[in-house]
Every structure is written in C-alpha cells, then in structure tokens.
Image (cartoon, grey):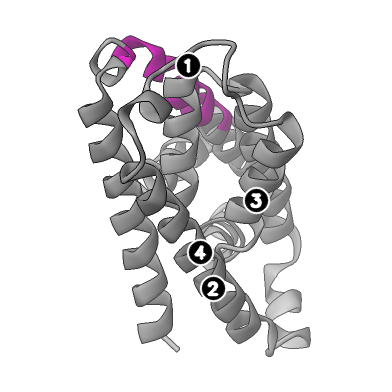
Amino acid sequence: MNIPVFGTGLVTGLSLIVAIGAQNAFVLRQGLRNEHVFAVCLICGLSDALLITLGVTSFRQIAALLPWLDPIMRYGGTAFLIWYGAKSLYSALRSSEALAVQEGAGFASVRTVLLTCLALTWLNPHVYLDTVVLLGTISTRFPGYEASFAAGAVTGSLLFFFSLGYGATWLRPIFSKPASWRILETFITLTMWLIAFNLLRDL
C-alpha cells in the first residue's frame, strides 16, 4: 500500500462525488427520513467500489469494445431521471400530513427503496464518467500503484455516503416542518431534471 497514492485516490474520489447529484439527493432524503439508511449507503458505496475497480483495471478496453454503450446509458438515464423528478414534484404537492417525518410509519418497502437506489446509481451515465472514465484515467498516472489509488477512492466513496446518510439526522428537526419537505422535494425535482437536460444536451 502506497500511502501518498492512497491519499490522492481518497481526495480525488471525494472531489468527484461531493457535488449534489441524483444519487446524493436520494441518500440525503433517505437519511432525513431515517429509512433504510445503512442499506442505501452500503449499496452506493459498494457500487462505486465495483465501478472504480472496473475503471482502474479495464476502462479503455470497455470503451473500445462497446462504443454504443454511452448513448444507451444517456437515454435510459435521462428517462429515469425525468420520471423520478416528476415523482418528487408530486410528493412536494401532497398534503402536509404525508410529508411529516414519522419514524417507523409510512416507510417505503426496503425492496422499493433499494431498487430505486440501484437505478439512480447504475442508470446514471455521470457515475460511469466519474468512476470508470475519470478515475480510471487518473490511476494510470501511478503505474504499479493502481490498487492503492483505487483503495483510496473507494474509501472516500464509503466515507462520503455514510456521512451523508447518517449526518442528515442532524437536520431532522428542520425537516419536521412540512414546508421544509416541500422545499427538499422541489430541490430534488430540479436537480433530477437539470441532470436529465444536461445528458440530452451532451448527446
């Protein structure tokens, strides 16, 4: 293990995932609701770990073999983000009772939450660009120490998602008010639709 390279991977990984996106907004929302937080954070972290490993080991070969994969991921991800944004907008317009924070009541099933989390992760082309392409490219600067770089990036991802998911509980008093939930759901809607617009614009 090369500590400086590990540190570079840690900082680089964090810098790429800290920006608010569809996946991060979802983790924040689950943390505020205290709903299946550990499972959601673990799925996000493990998914990143798999993609980072894939990028560090073989992203060049994948791009050369599957040139059609990028447009398919962009269209599929755009459709999902538009749908999820509309769903959040509907939640923002619902009654105040439905938006109140209630631990242990009104939870979505773990299956529904985890499938949504997986879709937000694996149908988002930006995830592949950040993990497979960008981190895969940067890792080539450290020949012989790619594993240390990947380990640092994976550690950064796990730290971020668990901090975001469980740190959100500190904000729960604010979101006990229905108006705060409406603002959050509206913000999520705008975030999803902005990402979808950018995906379409890049095609």
Residue 126 in the image: above or below residue 175: below
Segment tinted magenta in the rendering? 158-172
Please tell me whether the stretch drawn in magenta is mainly helix, strand or loop.
helix
Q: Disc 3 to disc 2, how far (Cα)?
A: 25 Å
> Which of 165 and 104 lies nearest the eye of the viewer?
104
Secondary element type, mark 1:
helix
Tag 4 near tag 2, CB within 8 Å: yes
Residue 21: percent from the left, percent from the top? 40, 51
Crowd rating for badge 1 (residues with CA inside 10 Å; few <14, some 14–19, many 20+): some
Please name the residue that numbered disc 1 is placed on.
Answer: 166
Identity, as a three-letter code, of the amino acid under mark 4: Trp
Identity, as a three-letter code, of the amino acid under mark 3: Ile
Q: Which quadrant of the structure image shows residue 62?
A: bottom right
Closer to viewer: mark 4 or mark 3: 4
The quadrant in which the N terminus is found is top right
Closer to viewer: mark 4 or mark 2: 4
Secondary element type, mark 2:
helix
Residue 19 in the image: above or below residue 65: above
Q: Which quadrant of the structure image shows residue 58?
A: bottom right
Identity, as a three-letter code, of the amino acid under mark 1: Tyr
Residue 13 in the image: above or below residue 140: above
Please name the residue that numbered disc 3 is placed on.
Answer: 52
Q: Residue at x 46, y 67 (%)?
A: 82
